[in-house]
Image (tube, rainbow, N blue to C red):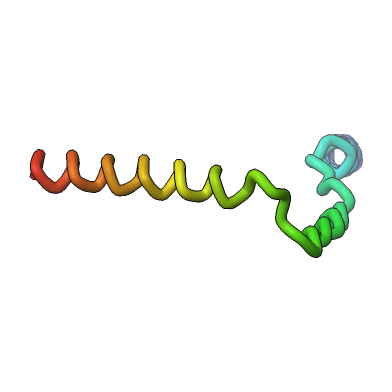
């Protein structure tokens, strides 16, 4: 009688463990990459020059700080 009780408790605990285990989310496919524009806007050259100038100034400051 005690053996049947222990088997039923063990079976219940196993069923509970299976039901409460964390489930893996379904894999989500990565989004499709956006295509690059065929032609850069007219203001792109000026923006690139500003970014490069700022990067050069930052590099100069960091090289003197080191």
Pick the front one: 25 or 34: 34
List x then y, in percent, for residue 59. 24, 47
Location of residue 3 by image quarter:
top right
**Residue appearing at x 30%, y 48% in the figure:** 56
List x then y, in percent, for residue 41. 72, 50
Pick the front one: 16 or 57: 57
**Residue appearing at x 41%, y 49% in the figure:** 52
**Residue appearing at x 83%, y 35% in the figure:** 20
List x then y, in percent, for residue 39. 77, 61
Classify 52 as above or below 5.
below
Q: Specify whether 32 is left or right of 54.
A: right
**Residue appearing at x 89%, y 39% in the figure:** 19
Q: Give the mark count.
A: 0
Q: Specify whether 24 is left or right of 53.
A: right
The N terminus, quarter of image: top right
The C terminus, quarter of image: top left
Q: Specify whether 62 is left or right of 47.
A: left
Pick the front one: 38 or 26: 38
Single out the residue that lies furthest toward the bottom. Answer: 38
Pick the front one: 48 or 26: 48
Location of residue 6 by image quarter:
top right
């Amino acid at each position: 009688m005690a053996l049947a009780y222990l088997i039923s408790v063990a079976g219940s605990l196993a069923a509970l463990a299976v039901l409460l285990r964390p489930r893996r989310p379904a894999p989500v496919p990565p989004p499709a990459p956006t295509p690059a524009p065929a032609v850069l806007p007219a203001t792109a050259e000026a923006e690139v020059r500003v970014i490069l100038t700022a990067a050069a100034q930052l590099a100069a400051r960091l090289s003197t700080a080191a």
